[in-house]
Image (spheres, rainbow, N blue to C red):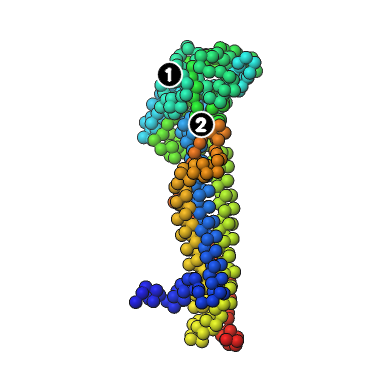
Amino acid sequence: MSITHKLPYEWQIGLRYTRAGKRSGRNSFISFISMASVAGIALGVAALIVVLSVMNGFQKEVTNRMLSMLAHVEIFDARGALPDWRATSQQALRHPEVRAAAPFLDAQSMLLVDGVMKPALLRGVEPAEEAKVSDVVRQMKEGSFDSLRPGSFNIVLGRALATSLGVGVGDRVSLLVASGGILGGAGAQGEGGPNALPRPRALTVSGIFEAGHFEFDSTLALVNIADAEAVTGASMPVGLRLRLADLQQAPRVAYELQGSMAGELIMRDWTKVNTVWFAAVQSQKNMMFIILTMIVAVAAFNLVSTLVMTVKDKQADIAILRTLGASPRGVMKIFMVQGTLVGMLGALLGVGLGVLVALNVDVIVPAIERLLGVHFLSQEVYLISEMPSELRWNDVGWIGGVAVLLSFLATIYPSWAASRVKPAEALRYE
């Protein structure tokens, strides 16, 4: 005896109705519409999985590039500067999650070359320590990061900033920094007040880096922290940049450091620095999920017309079942089984197709580009040449579950209508 014969009669009949009918043109047409519903659900589910995977890939790529230059946690002193950064660094390094700490000094500045003036975020760093908390050494395209020696007055620029100024390694730039332009946790300012005139200083470009993130490549300029103090009039760093073993633990670590470290310190983790950007990306993902779910919903609710036609076609069968003792609830269950199976089949096919495409985007997209002679991602604009994709199985589970749920909801009305069929009227003209 086969497994299907062990199932309740509602499941057996629902399974038989789901299979393509060959006895009449009408049955075949109904089955064709049913298969079209399966295809619609599958394509909608696959599209949703692929789109969300590509969006996840872009988010991960941009986040990684941002965090290659951002500190996982920043520590500021409420007084505006960090009097003894080495002692503060030792306190922070006692936390098991903290792997490295480096001092920094940020200041608003302008760079001037042959009449071309560009705004820049001047950051003073200790090269040996900075290499432990960021990936700037690995991102150097020209020159050397080690050239930022105290008193050398060398400067390392982002590639986009160097290009806009028209300078390369070995060229000279004029730096203008207002005494009140120092950026700290409590808005610290250098000596002379915010209205002091900028002090020009000639610097030599000794390196060019490319983080792959426009914000850093177009605005960030790095100098030795001693040189930064000299040109800004500051006497000490404004804060510490920390690198953690697990960047996802940054909010927790910042909270724990706040309670364990002495002094009036301010902690800021990387999620707070880019709150607006991450909120915007999440909002876009949510809206895309809703929009593409509507496509799945349209395909799922095609089941309504399919099941209504099936109910009309099977009225005689329903009447016979009722006369044999089937309850209205049993009849309703037959058509709910049929519709839900169609939805599950579509969801499974869609999940399989979507996962296959999402895992092979790096192969499929180049093949399409070669076939059509187009290029979807310009490296000059997006700074990446390959379509990123990150498949998240919790997304796949949600999408498949939503597709099955919508299919189940689409079966309720036709199944209820089938349970209301009156045997005498259905058999009158049979």
Task: Report how far apart the C-alphas of labels 2 and 1 lie in the structure.
Answer: 21 Å
- In percent of the image, x 44 and y 47: which residue is there? 359
- Nearer to us in this view, 21 or 215: 21
In the rendered image, which quarter is residue 3 located in?
bottom left
- Nearer to us in this view, 248 or 335: 335
In this picture, is 1 found above or below 119? below
Q: Secondary structure at mark 2?
A: loop
Residue type at mark 1?
Asp
In this rendering, would 238 be left or right of 243? right
Quarter of the image that includes the N terminus: bottom left
Whether label 2 touches label 1, CB < 8 Å: no
Residue type at mark 2?
Gly
Nearest to viewer (mark 2 / mark 1): 2
- Nearer to us in this view, 4 or 68: 4
List the single residue furthest toward the left: 1
In the rendered image, which quarter is residue 96 located in?
top left
Q: What number is the disc on residue 146? A: 1
Tell me which numbered mark, 2 or 1, is placed earlier along the sequence.
Answer: 1
Residue 373 x, y percent position in the rendering: 55, 41
Residue 304 in view of the camera: yes
Which class describes the residues within 10 Å of circle 2: few (<14), some (14-19), or many (20+)? many
- In percent of the image, x 57 and y 12: which residue is there? 201
In this picture, is 301 found above or below 182? below
- In percent of the image, x 48 and y 52: which residue is there? 354
Residue beneath disc 2: 212
